[in-house]
Amino acid sequence: MTWYQYIWAPGIWGNPAVHTAWTAGTLVALASGTVGVFVVMRGQSFTGHALGDVGSTGAAGAFLAGVGALWGFLAAGAVTGGSIEWLGRRVRERDIATGVVMAFMLGLSALFLYLVSIYTNASNAPMAILFGSLFTVSPSLQPALLGLSIAALAILALIYRPLLFSTATPEVAQSRGIPVRLVGLAFMLALVVAAEEAALAVGAILSTALLIGPAATAARMARRPGMAVLLAAGLAVGNIWLGILLAYDSYWWPPIHTGWPVSFFVTVVSLGMYAAGGLIQRVRTTVREGGR
Amino acid sequence: MKIEQTVQTTPQAALEITDLGVAYESTWVLDHIDLTVKQGEFIGIIGPNGAGKSTLLKTLAGLIRPSRGEIRFPAARGRRHPVGYVPQRFDLDPDLPLRARDLVGLGLDGHRWGFAWPNAQRGRKIEQALAQVDLTGFADHPAGKLSGGQLQRVLIAQALVSDPELLLLDEPLSSLDLASAQTVVDVVHRVSQNLGVTVLLVTHDMNPLLPVMDRLIYVVNGQAVIGTVDQVVQKDVLDKLYGYDVEVLRLHGRILVVGDETASGDAAGFEHR
Amino acid sequence: MFPPGLFTLQFMQNAWIAGTAIAIIGGIVGFFVVLRGATFVAHAVPRASFAGAAGAAVVGQSSVLGLGTFAVLSALGIASISRERRHGVATALILAAALGLGDLFLTIGHVYAPAVFALLFGQIVGISTHDVRAVLIVSVITVVLFAAAFRPLLLQSVSPHVAEAHGFWTRGLEILFLLLVSGAAAAMVPVVGALLAFSLMVGPAAAGSILGKSPLQALAWSVAFGVLSLWLSVWLAYLTFWPIGFYVSGFCLLFYFAARLIKR
């Protein structure tokens, strides 16, 4: 055992579970990073967060019904996203109503997960749904994840300009005849796909980290929108890769042979890059102002 | 109600409003508005707070559906969106990854699908629009870090780049210091002269517009009167519009409208600073 | 309807006592949460405290102690970044990292799955006499602080500028409010779970503020709805053995929408 095994553990390339984690994680990260930029610009972090949370209800329900968790996540996300988009206009009231409904959805999720643990042998299903486990993603899910990520990116590419327009200056966009609500709905569709993919990969209650961490960092560092989108996609992929690498290495960390959870690393790396981005930005401004 | 662009009316008219009414729930915010604006005119929309000035402008911009009446843009000859709209001041997040150039570019082709691939012609048009509002060199400035007056001018460039017949501005001078407000007025005036664009500008203080505006629309309680300053800002005209006695004071080239109930400073022309 | 042991079993007596206490402070603290529109704080603090409970389970300490520590830390953290731009993003990321940390503690500590489930979604059979004592102490402190600061807090919540003009220390009141939330969170999590404590702090208070014509009336309704939801939930959870958090969140939803219907 040499020292570098703690940071580059042996056998990472040969391990099939790691291989699936790389591909699935990359697909999910690409969608989350790009969609996330608009989530941050539109100030919809709370919506993204809520979508991940309620995804657990769908996933647990799907588990009970014997359907794949991914489809449960997506169904719950679609119902929630649709209702958030069409419901309430008074901001304050909407926050409370969303909160109470979201809490109930989680309560339902508690019930479903309880029933799962009673009637099936999957005692770790609740943990997998809530906290994710990229290493246990089935390789058979890869085509579905590929299709979903492509769909999310395609929607975003198609509505890119009208979306940016109605995000930056909604009233002007509307006066130019852009169907602002319809564009918002189309974006919600992409957001549901990205948020639920992230929920599957890093866990329902941790998915916000992948959705908005890299995106917020990129939005802070880039100056032009296209660059922010590309940077966010790159940072999200890097976030997932670093998470996988560290989780794989942690097998040799104390307590030895336990392995620390991937999702833990994903959340920590995400928070870390956001903080580092803020620091870099601060240093850059100081240097620029100092130079004058 | 219908919004139509017809060719048969007088060619000089940029805007014709007939019997326009806008209702929220069961209250008429605007009622029986009839007026015509000629091509190339600079019009101030003046009136106390809550009179319906912004509602009128938003209705013209297509943001509010009229409950009754017609709005026509005869000079536009059937163009779908002949107006350029500059919204009331709002704050952009300073961290937004958006440059002044991007905002103006959205005015050019933000309604199209997909991405905007960079090309020289597009870049030139954007820079031209920024030059028209005296912001040459600000193209790559982060939009969220522009000052209030600069952002206002970028939004004017965003509206101009779509080559509109009419430029509609909602309270562009509010919350600006006097110098910035004067710059915005000068820019708008020059643009209307050079490009022949018809301008409708909402403000609660008519004084900065006195040297440049051709006519004004005075809005009180959902009713509107159009005419030159001398025709409209008269005691008898305004008494009728307000429904009670007001005083029109002319002091050192400035006009103040003072009424019993608006002595708090809501009246048009009453100085806030 | 009333199966044997509902009131006589030791753990059920614990559940009734602790449940009533947290319902009361939930209603009280929730009143201010709704008044100040601070739903996100009420959502974030109990969740972040989950990591504390998980850590306490690993080192064999009382979960209320771990919960309290992390609840206070997260509340102070939120207070310190709340003035920055985009504090929503930072809060969400810190929250995710705290939950991830909880996940780590549970994994490396090999915590038994039902215990994790109880921490997240609540469990009435798991409340020890020791927990009851801790919950009661936290509740009493919360109620006393609340009673002492009721009027300044009310004024500051309704019109912050007036409060400032009166010379109140606004920042201090803000921190006091966050401490009240973290106290309530620490007491609630062992009973209704980290993910669902939020509903008890928002649902009854939102219903109360719809029905109440004065602050005191709203407060009374809020506490009444909270206690009623909790009693019904304890009873049903004992009948069915389903997680109590499910019932609590369900009744909170029910009372909230019922209040909206009545008012209309």
Image (tube, coloured by chain):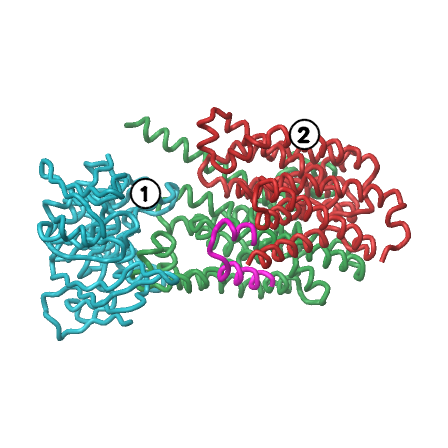
Chain colours: A green, B cyan, C red
Q: Position of residue A139 (x, y in %)?
A: 64, 61
Give the magenta range. A76-97
Residue A180 position, x and y percent, is 38, 61
Given residues C197 and B31, the one toward you in this image is B31
Left or right side of A248 for C236: right
Judged by depth in the image, the label closer to the viewer, 2 or 1, is: 2
Circle 2 — which element? helix
**Where C65 sits versus C88, above or below?**
above
| Residue type, label 2 | Val
Q: Closest to the observer: C18 or A86?
A: C18
Label 2 marks which chain's residue?
A: C
Q: CA distance from mark 2 to mark 1?
A: 50 Å
Q: Residue B227 or C41: which is nearer the viewer?
A: B227
Front-most of residues B267 and A85: B267
Question: Can you say which quadrant of the picture contains the N terminus of chain A?
Answer: top right
Quadrant location of the C terminus of chain A in the rendered image: top left
**Residue A233 visible within the image:** no
Query: Disc 1 marks which residue?
Result: B142
Residue A155 x/y as whole percent: 44, 63
**In the figure, is residue C9 to the left or right of B54?**
right
Task: Give the residue type that dot 1 points to.
Answer: Pro
Numbered tag placed on residue C144 in the rendering: 2
**x and y percentages locating residue A6 in the rendered image:** 65, 37
